[in-house]
Amino acid sequence: MNYAGRYPAARPRRLRQAEWVRRLVREHRLSTDDLIWAMVVHDGTEDEIPIAAMPGVARLSVKAAAKAAKQAASLGIPAIAVFPHINATKKDAAGKEALNPNGLVCTAVRAMKDAAPEIGLVVDVALDPFTDHGHDGLLKDGRILNDETVKVLTEQALIQVKAGADIVAPSDMMDGRVGLIRTTLDQNGCHDALIMSYAAKYASGFYGPYREAIGSAKLGGGSVENPGDKRTYQMDFGNTDEALREVALDIAEGADMLLIKPGLPYLDIVRRVKDAFALPTFAFQVSGEYAMIKAGGANGWIDEERVMIESLTAFRRAGADGVVTYFAPKVAEVLGGA
Ligand code: PBG
């Protein structure tokens, strides 16, 4: 009997016996280079307004966001994704405030670029922070209007790029928006603006705390004005082939980078997409994932810091090039900064 390659000759535990050898043979590791810091900004003067459902995350004033951009630079975090909490008085059914070149998003982008020009700025393209009904698109008779919404999103993206956004990230899941955004940016001389498409975004319960973070409607309604959740445009969580189709379409329309969302429960999608298309592929560790880790940690049920690093490394293992996460500054500190 030849024992070579089998127990007792083979003992995989030899490779785990000490930290030096574990480090040596480790296949995937998390680096500060992989982080996009998810940051919420508000249009008031208070520096920080805590978000109850997301302990440790606060809505930042424009001034505080500029300071945070500098902090990101000194921590070695490459990019920040900005999400706005708009004052309720500025919201309407059409989300018109999304097109205000002097609105919160553009003002924050300018201030952050000013403070830390070396940081990449990612801005969401979608209407939900600006609509009083909380949907990502225009609503008529209880239906989301695709093509009309795409026109508005295209304008929104152009305004954001003109304010200094480096990456526009359509998160709305309307059909055809990447193509129209790309064409419009190019026609306006913005060839260098990148598009990170939320290519496969699922209708998910994990976005819960984000509603509080940006102060958007709960979508519980089910009335004509408020038809409930986002399942007519975000993907059904039972599907994976559909994700590949969504991604293929967005690439054909000009997406430079892809985003899969939510994160941890969708690692299979990250893997399939990365294997099939080999484009820069990111995952979004969304608000609910953040909240669960914080809650478990606060109760002493899990070691928060350990689970934070473990879950983020899992994204790398699944093939993600990087992760959008509210934990970014904490992670950068744990990993030792730049
Ligand atoms: C909106 C948008 C959402 C998130 C990012 N952009 C919410 C949604 O689609 O309902 C979620 C972020 C998070 O939960 O952390 N287009």
Image (spheres, helix red, strand yellow):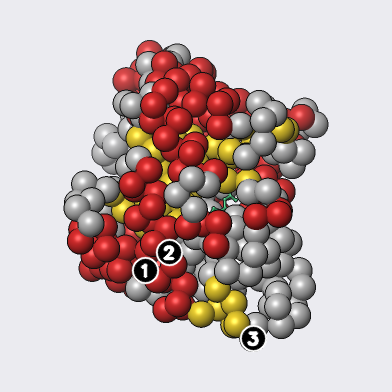
Nearest the eye: 151 or 226: 151
In contact (CB < 8 Å): disc 3 and disc 1: no
The answer to whether 259 is drawn above or below residue 145 in the figure is: above
Say which residue label 2 marks: 153
Mark 3 Cα shell of 10 Å, populated few (<14), some (14-19), many (≥20): few
Residue 132 visible to an observer of this rendering: yes
Q: Quadrant of the C terminus?
A: top left
Left or right of residue 140: residue 198: left
Say which residue label 1 marks: 177
The answer to whether 207 is drawn above or below residue 137 in the figure is: above
The mark nearer the N terminus, 3 or 1, is 3
The mark nearer the N terminus, 2 or 1, is 2
- Secondary structure under tag 3 reads loop
Q: Quadrant of the N terminus?
A: top left
Amino acid type of the residue tagged 3 in the rendering: Asp
Which x, y percent locates residue 78? 36, 30
Say which residue label 3 marks: 141
Amino acid type of the residue tagged 1 in the rendering: Arg
- Secondary structure under tag 1 reads helix
Which x, y percent locates residue 153? 43, 64
User: Looking at the rendering, which quadrant does residue 40 occupy?
Assistant: top right
